[in-house]
Amino acid sequence: PNEEMIVELDAGYMDGNTMAVGAVAGIKDFANPISIAKELSKDTVNCVLVAEGAEKYASKKGFERKNLLTDRAKQLYRKRVKEIKERELKPYDGHDTVGEVVLDCTGRIVAGTSTSGLFMKRAGRIGDSPIVGGGFYADSEVGGATATGLGEDLMKGCISYEIVRKMKEGLTPQEACQKTVNELDAKLKKSRGLAGDLSVVAMDKNGNYGCATNIQNFSFVVYRENEEPTVYRAQNIDGNTIISKATQEWIDEYIRERMAPIQE
């Protein structure tokens, strides 16, 4: 939830065949906002809506309203408020964005994102996720990309568009991801001394994928037809992203940490 313990969601969707885009931001009480964004992409205008306007549109289209503030989220919120008062911690640590790049059997590439944004963000804050070219981008003639991390920094590099542009120039998805992350990371550090979390995944029109990050522990999933979904770990080591298949032990520990009881 945000700083007022309200869940505000952002989502974006792009069809690489038609270049159609749909997005919602600051929408409350609707599950799966990516579905609303996809519906909006059918329009050529008024396809990016925020807050009350997005909620009215979703209701009109028959999307079900649902309270998304879970008991666990409330516990995390109360714990963090207490920690901030006691230890002067920053409220913005932690983020969870779901991003996908998909290639179907016809060659169509789509990209999308869905997120509740930074934990305890300022009410009304919008990150990169619903911003075309920032949080997501798709071009079926080239490929697609999606991003997660500190949205305010990801947007500054138009990072998803930039990755697709580099692939169009001939770079592999991995090369495009790594070069784009490194360039933006260096630019941010040069201009103001630090860079927020930057993590990206991409896929080209042939199904080759890439991933890059400037942090020590990022994970993503690859799923191919007739294969089991595979979880991979990505780690930044001296400016290079090292990718390895996640072990079952690592996955189990990740789940345990995420679901561990919260001590308020």
Image (cartoon, rainbow, N blue to C red):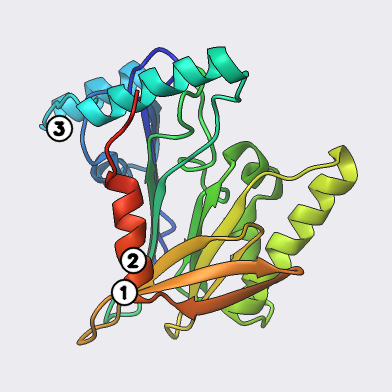
Q: Which mark is residue 251?
A: 2
Q: CA distance from mark 3 to mark 1?
A: 41 Å
Residue 184 horizontal/vertical position (percent): 75, 54
Q: Residue at x 33, y 66 (%)?
A: 251
Residue 19 horizontal/vertical position (percent): 44, 57
Helix, strand or loop status at disc 3? loop
Instruction: Look at label 1 and name its amino acid.
Output: Gln
User: Disc 1 designates what residue?
Assistant: 248
Q: Are marks 3 and 1 in contact (CB under 8 Å)?
A: no
Instruction: Look at label 3 and name its amino acid.
Output: Lys
Instruction: Look at label 2 and name its amino acid.
Output: Ile
Helix, strand or loop status at disc 1? helix
Q: Residue at x 14, y 26 (%)?
A: 65
Q: Which mark is residue 211?
A: none
Q: Is residue 108 something that shows in the picture? A: no
User: Disc 3 designates what residue?
Assistant: 61
Quadrant of the image containing the C terminus: top left
Quadrant of the image containing the N terminus: top left
